[in-house]
Amino acid sequence: MSRKVLGLDIRLDRVSAVLVKSSLRESRIAACLTVPIPETAPDPAGAWRAALEAVAGKMDLAGADCAVSMPAVFFSTRTLRVPFVNAKKIRMVLPFEMEPSLPFQADDLAIDFSLLPGASRPDETEVLAVAVEKARLAAVLDALAGIAIDPERVTLSGLWSAAWIGRNAAPEDALLCLDVSQTFGALFLVASNAVRLIRSFPLPTDPPARARAVQSHVRTTLGAIGEIEGLPQEPSEGILTGDGWEGMDIDALSSSLKLALSPADLRASLNVHIEDDLLPAWDAACMDGALALALAEIEGVECLNFHRGQFPGKKIVSRYRSPLIRTGALAAVVLLLMFASVIIQSYLQQRRLAELAQ
């Protein structure tokens, strides 16, 4: 059965969209687009609405499911150990565990978590907990509602690029995924094929200053890894995603960090096909994040999700309303004919019996 999934990577300076059509044989990129957002835009939510309307105007989104990412700098993350293994109990205690270290009330936050492997005790669970203000989440959902989209999942930018990179790495490898945009960056430590640590931070728009800021944050993170219990040894390789690397001296940054840095290309590494006429428009730096979201939704891989879409049965009924009506009408006609056949047969039998009795 074929399916259409739209990946939307929403950033402060752009919105990237990738539409993927999947079947039993393959997944193929059917459309892709990046809409820039002006630096002078006074209202980010309004700018997002305009960008999303441009996406809807250039792509056939009828019947498409949607997975969305928001700027990672909006999210706060913590790695916690809780004395539970039950997911419901973990979800209940996370607001109280996170509230003391955040400048927000727990009631103002949407919180989700992912389980991390390798807890030191059998009755203990290590979780990666992530929180975002409900007001920021509502701004994105309102912008999506303007083009009649209720997303299946909403997560933070860069996460699924790092997750796909981790899934394709050897279990013993430790990687540092660096997702850098024009105005913010995020670090993802990947080990044992899972994202174990997330840090996000604002960045200056000037490329040399941005390079120095990235260098500082990476050094701080690498220095902290060895001090945090349960994290692997310092990674020796860094994978670059995002479009904020333009104008930065990657070789100099790699030498200063003693970390082998290389750009990612998820379309090539995951062997995703693309229509020939779209190749000139494809930009891995801008579009890998949206592609990773679409593929995660197609594969049904669960991770951090801050919005559970409407009940799946309701979406199915809405999407296939006309075929279901036609099928129901045909079924009603068949049942009516069967009922009429039974009545006619009964009448003929009664008539035959009356003739025999006479």
Image (spheres, rainbow, N blue to C red):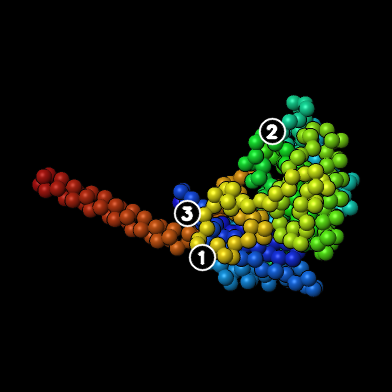
Are dots 1 and 3 in contact, CB under 8 Å? Answer: no
- 87, above or below 135, in the image: above
| Residue in the image at 75% along x and 40% along y | 236
| Label 2: how many Cα within 10 Å (few below 14, some 14–19, many 20+) | few
Query: How far, Cα to Cα, is label 1 from label 2?
Result: 39 Å
Extreme residue in the top direction: 122
Amino acid beneath label 2: Glu
Using the rendered image of the protein, determine whether residue 21 is visible from the camera's viewpoint: yes
Query: How far, Cα to Cα, is label 3 from label 2?
Result: 36 Å
Q: Could you say where residue 71 lies in the image, as x and y percent from the top left?
A: 75, 58
Q: Earlier in the sequence, mark 3 or mark 2?
A: 3
Which one is nearer the viewer's eye here, 65 or 271? 271
Residue for badge 1: 277
Q: Earlier in the sequence, mark 1 or mark 2?
A: 2
| Residue in the image at 70% along x and 53% along y | 241
Q: Which circle, 3 or 2, is nearer the viewer?
A: 2
Residue for badge 2: 172
Are dots 1 and 2 in contact, CB under 8 Å? Answer: no
Which one is nearer the viewer's eye here, 344 or 60? 60
Helix, strand or loop at label 3? It is: loop
Helix, strand or loop at label 1? It is: helix
